[in-house]
Image (cartoon, helix red, strand yellow):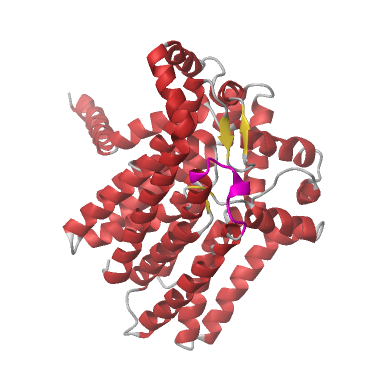
Amino acid sequence: MNRMGYHGAPWSSLKAKTVKMVRGHLVLIIANAGVIYLAMSGWNYYDIRYFILWHDNYFARGRIFEVYASDLKVAYPPLAVLIFVLTHSLAVAISPGNIFVWRLVDKLPLLVSFNAIYFLLRRNYGKFASNLWLLNFVTYSVISSYQFEPISSLFVLLAILSVKKGRYALYGLFSTIATLIKQGFAVILALPIIELLGRRAYKEAVKYVLVVVVTGALFTLPFFVVDPKGFIEKVLLFHAKRPPQYLSIWAVPAYLVKYELNRVPGWISSAWIFPFIAFIAPIFYLFLKDSKEGRPDLETLYVRYIVILMAGFLLLNKVGNINYFLWLSVPLIIFTASAKKHDSVLAKKLATISIFTSFAITVVFGFLTVFVQVVAGYPIFIFEDWNWVPADEFFVKCYAEEPFGMAYVIMLYFRSISALRETCKSLALTHSYFLAFLCAIYAYALCYIIYSAVKRPYKS
């Protein structure tokens, strides 16, 4: 009996701990089942076809540093390129021709980031914050289609946790890595420089700048020196030349004339930069002023201004990609969790806006631009290249490989229902007007977020 008790006690304890852990993270387990399905069932083939060529034509042939000198579309900073080609190389090595293995392995960095963000938020900001992350529809959309935002968002979170401890060098490292994955995060690199120079911490400022420059140069220079012009053209000017699109308020005129750019004044494509500068300059000044007043809690200060800067960037930028909402999501979650301690009403409003906005810009936007078009049998509009592609061909290449081909079968079934097909045809002919309305809702949500962060600087 003693022997059985001796062996049984540890087993019972382990069993109890396992049950407790599963119950404590049941929602995360369910979410992971969903993201694994999304990871394997599809991706945005229109983008992925270029990513795979980065690997096949350049990385696999030992000349990845020449990729920006090619004719391929490479609209991402170097670290994003390296992340994909390295994981895809592993996927090909594991299974040379299995597209489902490719998808799962290629998306492993996204899945790891998804879970890491959850646990870091839960540990540092509580269950409310981690649940808000799980309720962000954009995250699931990005994992399904494949984009790099979950990875860059993880490094932004690590940067925030670093500045919480006053470790500016680590903030510089992590925020630079985020910028090397997605260019838009460059705007948050300026914050420590402003703060440190404002309180005359010159040595710390120099150290910070060195970390940023060295980290950036380490990943950028090997690509840049091969073809400086090509690098600048693809990483920076490609986005500068794109017409206003997706959820940007600058895209509304194009939607009102049903994508006919020749009917939209040319100045609209470049006008966004002026209000953005007019917005960002006083925000940097306010940050400098706040950083001097009594040395406030660094985490509160940085989270507040990262929320303001990223929300302002999303509001005023002419390219309003759906996945860009994740640039704001993590700092917004932290800000909302902090607000909950002082103003539960505001926290509920911010949480509701965050969840509703992520739903609207993924589910509603996807319904209008993909579902309606496929069921109607009309082409799908590709915003990046501003052209139309056959709906069936696009959907099949993205989401219809067996054993996940049921999605396309369901679409065809819906198309066979005359009333639904005709309804979708009517929506397809007018969907751009609904997109204009969606842009207005998105802009309102961002304005409210900015207002809340400017007016209510809660301490953590």
Query: Which image quadrant is residue 213 in?
Result: bottom right
Residue 71 at x, y percent in the picture: 79, 44
Is 252 or 225 nearer to us in this picture? 252
* Quarter occupied by the C terminus: bottom left
* Residue 329 seen in the figure: yes
Considering the whole magenta stretch, tell me its main secondary structure.
loop
Task: Provide the residue span drawn in magenta.
Answer: 256-266
Q: Is residue 265 magenta?
A: yes
Please indicate whether residue 384 sits to the left or right of residue 154 in the image. right
Q: Is residue 25 above or below residue 398?
A: below
Q: Nearer the viewer, residue 315 or 186?
A: 315
Q: Position of residue 93 (x, y in %)?
A: 69, 29
**Which quadrant of the structure image shows residue 94?**
top right
Q: Residue at x 46, y 15 (%)?
A: 415
> In the figure, 408 relative to 458: above or below?
above
Front residue (pair 137, 174): 137
Question: Is residue 420 left or right of 341 when viewed as pictured?
Answer: right
Quadrant, the N terminus: top left
